[in-house]
Image: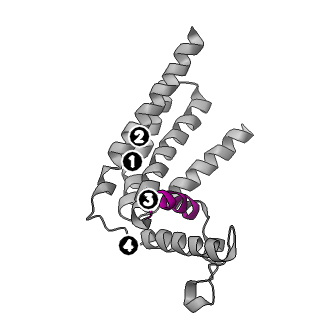
Amino acid sequence: MKEKLLENRKLIDVVLLILVGCILGIPLLNSNINVYYDDGIQHIARAFGTYTSIVQDGLFPNIISSFTNDFGYSWNLFYGPLSSYGIILIKLICNNYLIAYKVFACIALILSGMTMHKFIFGITKNNDAALLSGILYMSFPYHLTDLYSRNATRRICIFYFYTTCVFRII
């Protein structure tokens, strides 16, 4: 009985985190939001170049051959490829890089809240503290400024992988 209650609680926590993440991601639905400045244009350009390179040259390119007048540029050596591949996977469904970037940003926001939840639960073993931490992390002004002003999804993805690696060590 206690295990079933705990499983239901985990499901409720996940649903709440998804709901809060979707609410925080509502501004991404606005067509007037400009994602073509700061890191946003980099994410979209890298996704476009990576997809083009995959189609032309093969899987997992480090050098995007269509950049810099077809001389190639190793952009994926400087930045982690997760944001590019995430945007590409979503682009395959919706066939639009802008929409794919916005959906990926919302998914990254939700995953960051879930990861914070898992991280705090691993330390405290307290569901309430973990849920509150996940919601607070997603809604911190710095986090939302990164997402909406700087269009930076890398930091969100880095936190996800960092805490995942920490859990393997603990």
The residue drawn where x is 57% and y is 28% is: 124
User: Which residue bears the numbered disc 2?
Assistant: 136
Question: Crowdedness of circle 1 by 10 Å Cα count: few (<14), some, many (20+)?
Answer: few
Is 92 magenta? The answer is yes
72 in relation to 111, above or below:
below
Per the picture, the main secondary structure of the magenta-coloured stretch is: helix
Q: Amino acid at mark 2?
A: Leu
Q: Which numbered mark, 2 or 3, is in the foreground of this view?
A: 3
- Tell me residue 100's x, y (percent): 44, 60
How far is the residue under mark 3 from the one under mark 1?
30 Å
Q: Which numbered mark, 3 or 1, is in the foreground of this view?
A: 3
User: Which residue bears the numbered disc 4?
Assistant: 36
- Tell me residue 10's x, y (percent): 52, 26
Q: Amino acid at mark 4?
A: Tyr
The residue drawn where x is 57% and y is 70% is: 51
Q: Secondary structure at mark 2?
A: helix
Q: Amino acid at mark 1?
A: Phe
How far is the residue under mark 4 from the one under mark 3?
19 Å
The residue drawn where x is 56% and y is 65% is: 84
Numbered mark located on residue 71 in the image: none
How far is the residue under mark 2 from the one under mark 3?
31 Å
How far is the residue under mark 2 from the one under mark 1?
6 Å
Residue situated in front as seen by the camera: 53 or 72: 53
User: Which residue bears the numbered disc 3?
Assistant: 94
Numbered mark located on residue 140 in the image: 1
**N-term mark: 3 or 1:** 3
**N-term mark: 2 or 3:** 3
Q: Which numbered mark, 4 or 2, is in the foreground of this view?
A: 4
Stretch in magenta? 84-95
Q: Is residue 91 left or right of residue 121?
A: left
Q: Is residue 120 left or right of residue 151?
A: right
